[in-house]
Amino acid sequence: MKRVSIFGATGSIGQNTIDLIRRAPDEYQVVALSGGANIKQLAQDAIELGAEVAVTCYGARLDELRNALAGSGVDAQAGSSAIKEAAGRPADWIMSAIVGVAGLVPSLEAVKQGATLALANKESLVAAGPLLMRLARENNATILPVDSEHSAVFQALIGEDMSAVERVIITASGGAFRDWPIDKIRTATVADASSHPNWDMGQRITIDSASMFNKSLELIEAKEFFAILPSQIETLVHPESMIHALVGFNDGALMAHVGPPDMRHAIGFALHWPERRKLPVERLDLAKIGSFTFRAPDEARYPALRLAREVMELGGLSGAVFNGAKERALDHFIAGSIGFLDMAQVVEQVLSQMDADNRLRNADITLDTVQAADHMARQIADIKSKAVAA
């Protein structure tokens, strides 16, 4: 049996992972599940799957989790140190799907033990890509991308020589505001930004999709994972969300990955790799679909894309700063203290201030320096957000 752990089990990626495991229970032994405030779901899944331990990130919810697991034999834990300990428990396959930089430590613990890391946490590569990839090499760990776009690129590259790759095209739905006039976007509300046209996701990632900050993270992630130049990475708005990515080769050919907008495809590919198994996803009827549409992204509408390119060129700790500032700016938008387009302005100001003396590009990348850069970026983002609000 394959020993598996799922960090971020109560989110959409975690629930889709559990759905696949539930369909073949005799093949998997669940080691650890982690979640946030949805204690009922976390306990229910842990009991059903026979997990060794269930962890909530909220220390104050430990008693609630213990009560929900009473008599089940599942160990209840809480807090960041417990998540780290759970990620270090021996497992063959570990899903890292915690949203935000909080997912970095479980990702690092997974590769340290030489496990297969199914990586859905973008921030692990954005904030600490060189560190994560180095530790994976040193410990003979395997990292498999679970973002649909990066899974698509990974699959298109199977059997190919990276030296023949000219470009990688990451597609984007365009989010909630892809057809809005820019002037209207300036006054967009949290409710407006929280509805995605194609995907059913949590609030934060849905808003990040509307602002293209989510796609910006994916551009940086592609650079780190596939070790390609920023100039080789392109973005294309594809409203149907069925072509997840394309790879262009030196003979002019484009290899596209086409599939339904269902995260179980990318999750299942990583779960069963190196096999390709049957999955419970829709089979596309191309004649019924009729056509696919594409458009170039407008950076006036999506300034986060320009910032991502600057981060890719800077390197160093700029990814950690970019993500930390983005997360705090998003907090302020959700709280109603800044506007939708103000988020990019705040992130740009934080990047500019923190790289004033080239500190970001020349820094060593360790867990300590990444966490310090993240912490400082959040503090400055708070200051900049208050200034914007004033």
Image (tube, helix red, strand yellow):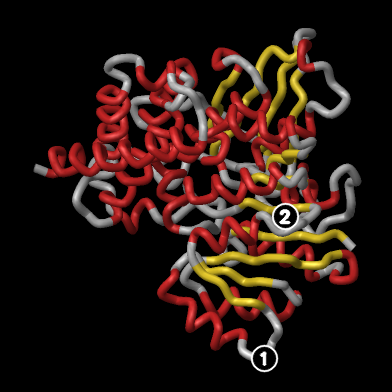
Residue found at x 75% / y 20%: 254
Residue 160 is marked as: none
Going by the image, does 170 lie left or right of 92? left
Distance between the Cα atoms at labels 1 and 2? Answer: 32 Å
Residue at the extreme left of the image, as rendered = 390
Residue found at x 76% / y 57%: 90
Work out which quarter of the rendered image holds the N terminus and state it: bottom right
Residue 56 against residue 369 in the figure, above or below: below
The local crowd at label 2, few if under 14, some if 14 to 19, many if 20 or more residues have their Cα within 10 Å, is many
Residue 266, given in percent of the width and then of the height, sits at 73, 47
Amino acid tagged 2:
Arg
Along the line of sight, the residue nearer the viewer: 19 or 373: 373
Amino acid tagged 1:
Gly
Residue 143, given in percent of the width and then of the height, sits at 72, 39
Residue found at x 28% / y 53%: 189
Residue 11, given in percent of the width and then of the height, sits at 56, 62
Residue 188, given in percent of the width and then of the height, sits at 28, 48
The local crowd at label 1, few if under 14, some if 14 to 19, many if 20 or more residues have their Cα within 10 Å, is few
Residue 264 is marked as: 2
Along the line of sight, the residue nearer the viewer: 266 or 119: 119
Q: Please, what secondary structure does the residue beneath circle 1 have? A: loop
Along the line of sight, the residue nearer the viewer: 137 or 96: 137
Going by the image, does 348 lie left or right of 128? left
Residue 207 against residue 317 in the figure, above or below: below
Residue 71 is marked as: 1
In this rendering, the count of numbered labels is: 2
Residue found at x 84% / y 21%: 160
Q: Is residue 184 visible?
A: no
For the residues bearing labels 1 and 2, Cβ distance under 8 angstroms: no
